[in-house]
Image (cartoon, rainbow, N blue to C red):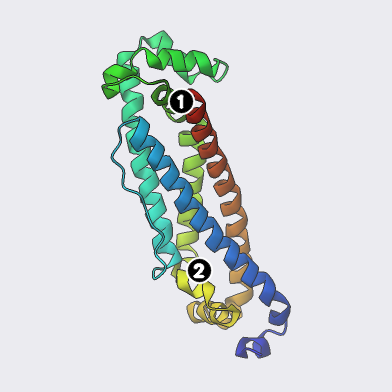
Amino acid sequence: MAQSDFLYPENPKRRQEVNRLHQELLDCLSDSFHATNKLIGVLNTHLGCRLASIEMKRDATIKENCDIIIQAMKKIQKELQKVDEALKDKLEPTLYRKLQDIKEKETEKIAIVQKVISVILGEATSAASAVAVKLVGSNITTGIINKLVTVLAQIGASLLGSIGVAVLGLGIDMIFRAILGAVEKTQLQEAIKSYEKHLVEFKSASEKYHHAIIEVTNTVKHQMK
C-alpha cells in the first residue's frame, strides 16, 4: 500500500481509474502528434509548405509536449492564412465570398479555387484545390484547431503540465508520487478532479481534430483517383 493511502483511504479505489486516465492522456497526446504530422504532410505535398514534422519527447513534461503541438499548429495556421490571403487577392470578391459560404457546394468551391491555384502555387492540381477548400477559412482552422490549442494550453498550465511523460509508463505508484510531489497532499483530490475535467475536454477536441484531418485526407485521395 502506498503511503498516500494512509492519508486518503479512498485512494485504493481510485488507483485503477487514475491509471486509466493517465494512459488516455498519453494516448491522446500521441494521437495528436500523429494527426498533426499527417496534416503537415498534406500541406507540404499539396500546398507547397515546408513545415517540419514533430515528435513526442518521452523525456519531457506534458506541458513541453503540449507546447510542441501548439507551436506546430500555429505554424500551420500561419501557412493557411497565407493561402487565404492569396485567394482573396486573386479571386473576384463574389467568388471569394462563395468560398466562405457554407451553403455552397464543395465541388463548386474546388472549381473556383482551381481557377487561381496555379498562380498561387506555381502548379494546378485538383488535390491542391481540395486541400485549400477544406482548410482555408473553414471550421477546421477557425474552430477545431483553435479549440485544441486552447485545451492543450490549459493542460500545460495545470498540475498535469509538470508531470513527465515517461512517468506515465512507470506504474501507478510513480504517478501518484509525481502528483504528490507537485501539490500539498490535502489538494490531491481536487487535483485529480481537475485532471479528469481536462481529459474530457482534450478527448473531445482531439477527436474532432482527428476526424477533420481524416476528412481532408479522404478528399485528397478522391481527387487523385
Q: Residue at x 31, y 30 (%)?
A: 82
99 over 12 or under it: above or below: above
Give whichever of 69, 224 is nearer the camera.
224
Q: Could you tell me the amino acid type at mark 2?
A: Leu
Q: Which residue is mark 2?
A: 159
Give whichever of 203, 7 is nearer the camera.
203
Secondary-structure class at tag 2: helix
Spot occupied by residue 121 in the image (x, y as percentages of width and height)? 28, 24
Q: Residue at x 50, y 33 (%)?
A: 216
Spot occupied by residue 47 in the image (x, y as percentages of width and height)? 34, 30
Q: State the mark number for residue 21.
A: none
Spot occupied by residue 65 in the image (x, y as percentages of width and height)? 41, 60
Q: Could you tell me the amino acid type at mark 1?
A: Met
Report which quarter residue 63 is drawn in: bottom left
Instruction: Give the crowd class for mark 2: few <14, some 14-19, many >=20 residues within 10 Å.
Output: some
196 over 87 or under it: above or below: below
Q: Which residue is mark 1?
A: 224
